[in-house]
Amino acid sequence: MLDHRSPADELAHIRAEIARLKRREAQLREAYLTQPDMPRLGRWTKVEIVTHSCQVFEPRLLPEDIRLDPAFQREKVTRLLRTTPHARPTNHLPPLVAAEQISAAPQREMSMLATH
């Protein structure tokens, strides 16, 4: 199937679909973690709950003078693509006839027809 959307519209559509899928995944994940009777065997897939733990470095636990020391900081630059709806383009063509002229036009035409 060919997609005739502009790349900007396609990107917004894909992001909306990903958000919908993430919401559904969160619902299913919550159900598996809180309802032990959830069926874990599907036609092609089985669900296993695996618990994993590891040690992580927690910089906020360091003393403030170390956390705020510029020697231990670096700049991180991130680029993102933001999608926002925009207003539809409006028709920039001027009206063909002004409002006053529309109401006067039939009378003028009628008077010209009457004189000829």
Image (tube, rainbow, N blue to C red):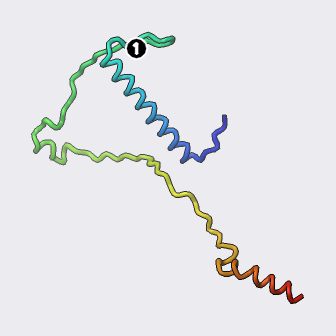
Q: Residue furthest right?
A: 116
The C terminus sits in image quarter: bottom right
Classify 10 Å Cα crowding around label 1: few (below 14), some (14-19), many (20 and above): few
| Position in image of residue 107 (x %, y %) | 75, 83
| Position in image of residue 27 (x %, y %) | 38, 26
Establish if 89 lies above or below 8: below
Q: Quadrant of residue 29?
A: top left
Describe residue 40's horizontal placement relative to residue 55 as left or right.
right
How many marks are shown on the rendered structure? Answer: 1
| Position in image of residue 8 (x %, y %) | 54, 47
Q: Residue at x 31, y 45 (%)?
A: 76
SS label for mark 1? loop
Residue identifier under label 1? 47
Describe residue 64's horizontal placement relative to residue 23 as left or right.
left
Q: Residue furthest bottom?
A: 115
The N terminus sits in image quarter: top right
Establish if 111 lies above or below 15: below
Give 58 or 113, whichever is nearer the viewer.
Answer: 113
Give 114 or 108, whichever is nearer the viewer.
Answer: 114
The three-letter code of the residue at mark 1 reads: Val
Q: Quadrant of residue 22?
A: top left
Q: Residue at x 18, y 48 (%)?
A: 70
Q: Residue at x 40, y 47 (%)?
A: 79
Establish if 33 lies above or below 103: above
Describe residue 95's horizontal placement relative to residue 36 as left or right.
right
Q: Residue furthest front?
A: 114
Q: Residue at x 59, y 47 (%)?
A: 6
| Position in image of residue 33 (x %, y %) | 31, 19
Establish if 7 lies above or below 90: above
Give 58 or 2, whichever is nearer the viewer.
Answer: 2
